[in-house]
Amino acid sequence: MEKKEKDPWARDETSVLEVYHVETGRREVLAEFEEVIEAPNWSKDGKFLVYNSEGRLYRFELASRASTVIHTGFATACNNDHVLSPDGSMVAISHVEEKDRCSKVYTLPLTGGTPKLVTPVGPSYLHGWSPDGKTLAYCAQRGEEFDIYTIPVEGGAETRITEVAGLNDGPEYDPSGAYLWFNSVRTGLMQAWRMKADGSEQTQMTFDEDRNTWFPHVSPNGKLVVMLSYRKGDLKPSEHLPGKQVELRLMAAGGGEARTVAELFGGQGTINVNSWSPDSKSFAFVSYRPR
């Protein structure tokens, strides 16, 4: 979910696009940007990343380290909630409509094109695309509550998956499609959770007493989960702000103790969506530097 701001790009920071290599523990800097960039996805063929910046999507070639814009038609207010289709041919975006200032979910070809509206009701913030390509999962505010919903990728009736007071956010399918991972503030601090794709068996997966944990992303081989954590007291548990000292933490997908693998200045925009490489050996993220 993209935090509502008057101008989300009015951040006096430069951006560093990085990759963490799981086997070696090495952080590799791919490129630095004067503008704010956010939320890299990794392509299915492993050759490029997709990120958003100033309302648009960009393709970053790993071989040349060059960025080119992905033409998204009228959707020029894209936020950091975007996901690639399982076959790598499409991208689903969250675009803020000018008329009502609400984020809504659209799909379009990854090569560019005219977006097709999927969720006519907003605000809706995309996070997951089912492995069979048929369903999108997103966080949405309906009434006073933020809950997790699913909808057919072609549009239609949405299904409410969680009905627990407090923010439930970041729903993402595991590679089997049987489970959705998400984060929820229902126990006081933000924690990572997992549930069956139909919303049953909602199970807490992290139990940190000194951290607020966001956006669990499952590796393509289904073995690891990377998460973003804020220190307790740095912000409200329901907030995920930029400009904070944060940690990236790894945990076995079956549960257990998580370990910190990177500390950085960031938060909002660092790793909002799944950024694992297709071979599960690396993940991409963005750190920031105050000017």
Image: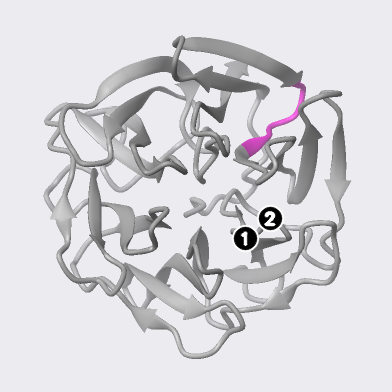
**Image location of residue 134, percent across then percent down:** 53, 75
Q: Is residue 159 visible?
A: yes
Residue span colored magenta: 33-38
**In-front residue for pair 56/195:** 195
Give the residue drawn at x 79%, y 58%. 76
Quadrant location, the C terminus = top right
In the rendered structure, does residue 130 fall within the stretch colored magenta?
no
The correct choice, above or below, for 10 with respect to 55 in the image is above
Residue 85 is tagged as: 1
The correct choice, above or below, for 121 with respect to 62 in the image is below
**In-front residue for pair 45/167:** 45
The answer to the question of whether label 1 and label 2 lie on touching residues, with beta carbons closer than 8 A, is yes
Residue at which label 2 appears: 88
* Left/right of residue 50 with respect to residue 38 in the rendered view: right
Considering the numbered disc 1 on the image, is that residue within a helix, a strand or a loop? loop
**In-front residue for pair 291/18:** 18
Give the residue drawn at x 31%, y 34%. 235
Give the residue drawn at x 40%, y 71%. 141
**Image location of residue 230, percent across then percent down:** 32, 29
* Left/right of residue 203 with respect to residue 235 in the rendered view: left
Marks 1/2: CA–CA distance? 5 Å
The correct choice, above or below, for 147 with respect to 79 in the image is below
- Label 1 sits on what residue type? Ser
Considering the numbered disc 2 on the image, is that residue within a helix, a strand or a loop? loop
Give the residue drawn at x 15%, y 32%. 256
Residue 185 is tagged as: none
